[in-house]
Amino acid sequence: MEAALKVQGLAKAFGGLTAVSGFDLELGPRDIQGIIGPNGAGKTTVFNLITGIYRPDRGRVSLGNTETTRFGPDAVARAGIARTFQNIRLFAQMSVLDNIRMAFHPGAGYGLWWATFRTARFREEEARILARSLEHLERFGLAGLRDEAAGGLPYGEQRRLEIARALATGPRVLLLDEPAAGMNPREVEELIQLIRKVHQDFPLAILLIEHQMPVVLQLCREIQVLDFGETIARGAPGEVVRDPRVVEAYLGEEEARA
Amino acid sequence: MTKTAWTALLPLLLLGACKPGGNELKIGVSAPLTGDISALGQSTKNAALLAQDEANAAGGLSVGGKTLKVRFVVEDDENKPESTATVFQKLINQDRVVAIIGSQSSKCANAGAPIAESAGIPQVTPWATNPNVTKGRKFVFRACFIDPFQGKVVAQFAAGRLKARTAAVLYDIASDYNKGIAEVFRDEFAKLGGTLAGFETYNTKDTDFSAQLTKIKAAKPDVLFLPNYFNEVPLQVQQARKLGITAPILGGDGWDNPELVKLGGGVMDGASFSNHYSPDTSDPGAQAFIAKYKARFGSVPDAAAALTYDAAQLLFKAAGTAGKAEPRALRDALAATSGFKGVTGTITYGGSGDPVKGAVMIRIENGRFVFDSAVNP
Amino acid sequence: METVVQQLLNAAQLGAVYALIALGYSMVYGVIRLINFAHGDIFMVGGFAGLLLALRFTWMPLWALMPLAMLLTALLGVAIERVAYRRLRQAQRMSLVITALGVGIFLENLVRLGVGPETRQIPSRMPTTPVAWLQDALGVSVTWDKLLIIFVSLALMALLWAVVHRTLLGTAMRAVADDKDVVPLMGVNLNRVIAVTFAIGSALAAAGGVFFGQAYSLDPYMGIDLGWKAFIAAVIGGIGSIEGAVLGSFLLAGVEVLTVAYLSSNLKNGIAFGLLILLLLIWPSGLLGRPASKKV
Amino acid sequence: MLAPPPSPRAPGPWALRGLVLGTLALAVALQLMTEAGILPEVLNPYYLHLLTVVGMNIILVASLNLLNGYLGEFALGHAGFMGVGAYAAALLAARVLPPPSSLPPFLGPLLLLLPTLAAAMAAAAAAGYLVGRATFKTVGDYLSIITLGFNMIIVNVIQNIDAVGGPRGFTGIPRNTGFAAVAACTLLTLAVLRALVQSSYGRVWLSIRENPLAAEVMGVDVNRAKLQAFTIAAAFAGLAGGLWAQYQQFITPRSFDYIKTTEILVMLYLGGMASLSGSILGVVAYTLMMELLRNLLGAFAPQLAEWRMILSPLILILVMLTRPSGLMGHREWRWLRPRGRS
Amino acid sequence: MSLLRLEQVSVAYGAIRALHGVDLEVREGEIVSLLGANGAGKSTILRAVSRMLPLQGGDILLGGRSVRATPAHELVALGVAHVPEGRGIFPSLTVQENLALATWTRRERRHVEEATRRVFRLFPRLAERRTQAGGTLSGGEQQMLAVGRALMTGCRLLLLDEPSMGLSPLLVREVFRAFQEINAEGTTLLLVEQNAHMALKIAHRGCVLENGRIVLEGPAAELAGHPRVREAYLGEAGASSPPCPGTPGSSR
């Protein structure tokens, strides 16, 4: 089985400070994996390196057969990697519908001239985008909010919209950065269900960063633990949480027992 | 709500719209009342009011057997071409003036001219010296001489009277007036056998000229020509003297304003400039104007005021000869003007809107403008 | 050689005045992210305040006149903030910019109407005698007033730097720049800190105005161009940074003066701004500005 | 709890035929009326002039809205683009093409107008493209300075070209435009801009304003989108410049300096950002304010004519204090709103 | 003795009502935890208390005195400190400067020195990072700085908004241990927290908010055993019961 996303020896330093060193990852086409670790361990930096927001100092990232190491964020996205952010980044003043429609822009089959003159081709494409966006919203239970400003939605719905928007780009790999941050256990439970459903319905692999252990334990096939930019443990979640190094650096005694 | 508010306000726009009065000579004045040369706009307005009140105090003008009261409508053109266009449209179509005085700067006069021309309303600009303003136009006149003539006068003065072999020029490149004179001076001075030691520029509103003057100083010219406006020249002269430039300094009619010596103080002494008229003039009519202006506004009238006053008198006279307050007749009468004696000299229109007119050179002595010599074309 | 030194000296004097204006721009921008387009006009009012004081109290020495003009202008700055800006602090940034433009036009025309449209000069209270030893050493014209302008400006800037970086008030100002909503939770009166910032910025501009009125001249519309220049200087240096504003000002003045001296006075603006754009292409956030990092 | 969602509809056809034909018909009718001397009789030429100026300003403001409203930048060089267009059109009209007097009376101006306006748009678009490229690395106020600097460079360069009159200005431009042509151009500009902002491109511009990084990870090439916006906005500014030159028949470089830029900005923010209705309203309100003041002062207190420039900024400040998001805010008039929405 | 009392407090954001007549009492020396879903109004209560939001109705009494009309910055002098959601540290200021700014209302040398010592004892890591800019700290250190800074005001009442957000499990415990210590030293705590386990573990009393109203109130241990709380906020058992209103994902 060929990996959907393959990361080898990824490294990045800011100034003299090593943020990530030698990060490896092999994510199967339908895999779910997780990254955990203390604050400042370099988890989000890994995401930023994969999605092209930062240029790695060393290492390579490939998506299927395409090497995306030197791609900019937009090219990475078009290649098929979508992501969400730790602090939700919606287009706050745009409507829920337009947030989704945005995602179809790279695939819109019309150019500026067609838009200027509103040709038949433009109208067909717009109709297609609209239909697909509505379908997508329906799927995530957001159709009723289509004309609301995204910034005005309750927190949980903003999270959901952000995930829906990422999926609208039709990715092969979805990166979720602390999707459960600021949620209570009940909301976390619902999020887990949502991610499960996404994984069932869409043909993609998921990589997530999370502090809430239930999410990691229930969803991930494999996790790795980062500390000071280095992987200190990797494996099935159940085993990893018992690793003494992980307990010391990240979980603490209590959580490991629980 | 807003909609109703606007509809309520709209009729107000129409307030000023009235048909030309039967017993009124209505003349528009477009002046830079605000903006960078608003000092000049002020003297324009003053002179126009003086001419209006004078005429009305004498009972009005006798035109074709009727006595007409004079009314000036003064509008602010902000010294911007766009605003001048609007002002001209308003004066012509809303106030229904029969003639327009203005605008003062060449760029504004130029923006107004096509409108006056196509509406068939005579326009007399008192102060715009750019040759293009009147070129090819039938309805556009001016009360002043044009830049090339003035440049020539100063070049001759430098080469002849001052016996200068080398000259340097510092002028505002962003201003049409300054650039025009500077270039004519350069060409004329070369024709007269002189050499140009420096031809430096700055931009309107610059206040620090030390870089250019330092360069000029190194070139050691016999004279320094500053064809710039009165509000900038003292600064330039101060900075030049401070840097140790001792050459005599020359200027053009842009210098003519009492502010020049007020601002510059002693450093202006010994400098000379070309002008439309000299307050030293022995002409009794001019002296009367100067006295009245001084009495009412407390300062010696500058060239812009004198020229505005002359433009007004030109129109009054034309109305008298035409016998009716009608634009076309006024225009024809204006074009036929010959030997009109104004404050700034004798004006004759020889087929174009540019008067055949002399210039004077003025010397500054102890803070006073002193007549030096007259130059006639 | 002498000309180079002379030109650099010219640039230093011009740069000092730019810097006094640019600092106010930068400070106000730093605390409330407002490009205060009225700042150039506050500078102009400061100059006229100095002029009126100098005309009214002919006996007053410069060291008394200047602080008084600064005080009056500071009050004006505070009043403008109170009346025209405070209500819009939470509104979108651009409505504040337009209000500031409006305030600027209002001030220009008010002064024009109140004091008159003429160009004026503050009767100099500075010794204009040459500095003999320096002139001999450098072989160029150096007058005391020039040195005074440069040094007093630098001293004011140093004082400002000390206030901002060494006092609790300065800490509060920088905190407002970071996150003004949290500042009240520290027990700090936000409105007062902002008012003080406007006061300091306006006072510095007034100092610039008083110098400018003596070294050059004053007219009601002069604030527009100088304001823009100072704004550009502040941005070049890295807007929001005190050191940046000073550096940017001297740099802009230097580029302007040297362009005129050695390249072309005709294309001064073209070349000067071309260079500045080039500079921004190399340092996209100004020389000392915080880089606009992609914070994720 | 929520109203049922409006039935999804595809965007309606831009009345391409309808609008173009309608606009042309209107222009022809207006032009005929002008030629026949009817229009000036019906409408005072002063008002007609104001309407013409309003039209040209709407083109300027609406196109700047693309950059400052939709893309969310703070561009300060719009008058520079306008100047490029104005000079390009002026050069072509006055130096290259035959004078209108040598052409048939009605068709002549139109024949001259098309190539000159096309040249104006192309020249300005090229300038916009260059500026857009130069702004790739910078954002925010640093980007503003680049656009402002460009504006100053343009003015300075024109001042140094004697062939176009330098600072003395470009005289002798034939008058090829009037109210009719300006009205037609304004309508077409609004139609095109409306079509664009309601297309995928418009959504991309808005998304960059809202969150450039998020837009990027959605696959948007931010630089390309910026470049498109700059080029289009500049092209329309050039169109306004081309109209301006051939309407006023005289242009000077300083008419296109940052003072003009700030005037466009004031009208833009007065109306409201990211709203085409706001752009229209802003221009109309500003023009009306200035002319009302002129007329009211002229009628009641002619000696206070200078007060106009004191009162108008006060009114402006008051409006901004009471309507901080501009007169329209972000709203749109019905006829400018996208179709297929509730 | 009651330190803080909310009487029928109502707050609205624009047209949207966030609190509907909330009554709440916090006694001197207590730790009180506010539980509830996102958007239930927990943070709004804290913001209303620290006067960051205007009241629509009701009153807030601090030590029996109404602070309805007191501006936010004066409340600090009365002994209320608020650690806002997202920490709200000043990223360009150093750790030292962040701490110093909080002594704005109490600049006596003795207080400043004592408070600094206390903060550095509670969070030794801040002492190490003294001259580092706040923005360069890790998430956990920033949270410590935010709490430490609040303590510098010399507060009697500390309002904490989601202190565990974005922190790793180990850090969460470290921070909560510090809260207990702070409380033991005599400071009253009002805590908003999604992590109901932790929140109820250290609290004396708890309140449950739903849709801007308090629906349950009682000793922490009792609440932790209450079926409704166990199901909705501790994520245990009973998926069969209807979802709570206001919970995201509940279809409406």
Image (cartoon, coloured by chain):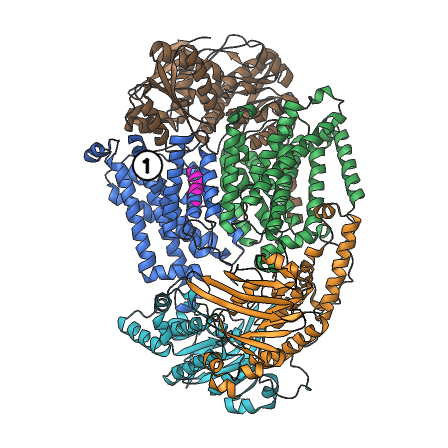
Chain colours: A orange, B brown, C blue, D green, E cyan
- Between E247 and B198, the one nearer to me in the picture: B198
In front here: A13 or B310? Answer: A13
Q: In the rendered image of this protein, does residue B186 appear above or below residue B30?
A: above
**Most extreme residue toward the left, as rendered?**
C133
Tell me, yes or no, whether the highlighted magenta stretch contains residue C227: yes
- The amino acid marked with disc number 1 is Leu
Quadrant hosting residue D177: top right
Residue E126 position (above or below residue B347):
below
Image x and y of residue D196, in percent: 69, 48
Which residue position holds label 1? C8
Asked whether residue B366 is drawn in magenta, I would say no
Please identify the quarter of the rendering in which residue C14 is found. top left
Query: Magenta residues, as a range?
Result: C222-231
**Disc 1 on helix, strand or loop?**
helix
Rendered position, C106 above or below D167: below
Tell me if residue C75 can be seen.
no
Image location of residue B182, percent across then percent down: 44, 20
